[in-house]
Amino acid sequence: MRLGLFMMPLHPSYRAIADCYDRDIDQLVLADKLGFDEAWLGEHFTEKWENAPSPDLLIAKALALTERIRFGTGVTLLGMHEPVYLAHRVAMLDHLARGRFNWGIGLGGIPTDMALMGLDPAHARDRAAEALEVVLGLWQSDGSFSHQGKFFRVEAPKFNPVTERGLHMKPMQLPHPPIALAASTPRSGSLKVAGARGWSPMSSALLSTAFLPGHWETVVDGAKSAARTPNRSDWKIARDIFVGPTSEIARERARTVLGRNYDVHQRPSRAGTIQMQIMKLDPSMADDDIDVDYLMENLWIVGDPEECADKIRALYEAVGGFGTLLSVTADSDDPAWDHESLRLLAEEVAPRIADLG
């Protein structure tokens, strides 16, 4: 099984923004040294706790400070972007990374991000899907490109070999960087797209095992529609993970940090939405029953190295197998807690699950 990070990022709102980014970079550099395979950095515009409106900038800085770990956007919210500019920006980042880059994309977004951009949520997925086709079309063009759609109209100037002006920018990795599609709702349509296109599906951290198997089934459905055979090793599942030297220390730290994240940020923002439902093992559960104790026992992976390995193995068996476990990064007031958790995950948990995947 491969190990990666999913950096939403998730920072308490009292943390200075510059300090947040420094802490993120420290964890990314450490993950590279510890042998993590990949790291995905989120994008939001109106989430004060998830304060990374331009994850490509953070990736560019991290690339210069690391040697082998692959970075990805986690995810580019396609509907929020003008696709011509996005195509050039992502292509440039792929060259800066010398191919050490994955492109994570999402077809949805949160309502306040859409409102900021003046977008109609009813058209969000269609706009995102069209933006994706424009980006891919630009990258796959032969020097000219035309698109007349519902949301975007593009007439790219044909490349002139004499003046050397015109459409020319493509990623280093052709025809495009490896693409992953994120999904956070049951049987998300994004997963059908991933299956049909042969891209990696990525399941969000708070989906219970009551819903995760349906994610893979949806990928399979999409793959069948395009006569493809999906590989479970391409499936990425995110989880909140806190490893400690003892079970007691791990649980105390998780309650302090992950509990703070949930009670102060996630619970209020998810109340009354499908995002509360996806955490339930039993759909009849009341929302009030989704508390820190429930999450500690049923969704989060918390404990000493042996306990965490057992919980990862149980997750793997419950969903039928997957390829990459993405640990959601935390931001403890004492960053040593986060660094120790990453070290223990890489050095003591990973060897115990090396037979998986």
Image (spheres, rainbow, N blue to C red):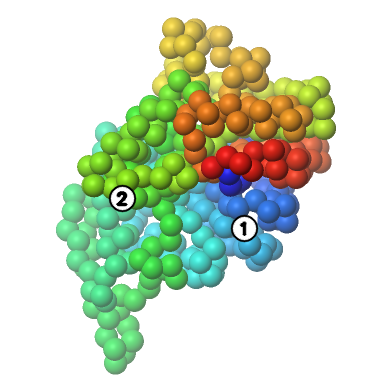
The residue carrying pointer 1 sits among few (fewer than 14), some (14 to 19) or many (20 or more) residues within 10 Å by Cα, namely many
Residue 22 seen in the current view: no
- Of labels 2 and 1, earlier in sequence is 1
Of all residues, the one furthest to the front in this rendering is 355
Horizontal and vertical percent position of residue 123: 26, 38
Foreground residue, 145 or 163?
Answer: 145
Please name the residue shown 39% across and 34% down the image: 216
Please name the residue shown 58% across and 40% down the image: 356
In this rendering, is residue 180 above or below 70? above
Looking at the rendered structure, the secondary structure element under dot 2 is helix
Q: Is residue 86 left or right of residue 290?
A: left
The residue carrying pointer 2 sits among few (fewer than 14), some (14 to 19) or many (20 or more) residues within 10 Å by Cα, namely some
Q: Is residue 281 left or right of residue 231?
A: right
Q: Quadrant of residue 165?
A: bottom left
Q: Which mark is residue 69?
A: 1
Residue 297 seen in the current view: yes
In this rendering, is residue 318 above or below 70? above
Q: CA distance from mark 2 to mark 1?
A: 25 Å
Please name the residue shown 56% across and 21% down the image: 267
Which residue in the structure is indicated by mark 2?
197
Please name the residue shown 29% across and 67% down the image: 140
Amino acid carrying label 1: it is Ile
Foreground residue, 48 or 355?
Answer: 355
Horizontal and vertical percent position of residue 261: 64, 28
Horizontal and vertical percent position of residue 199: 38, 50
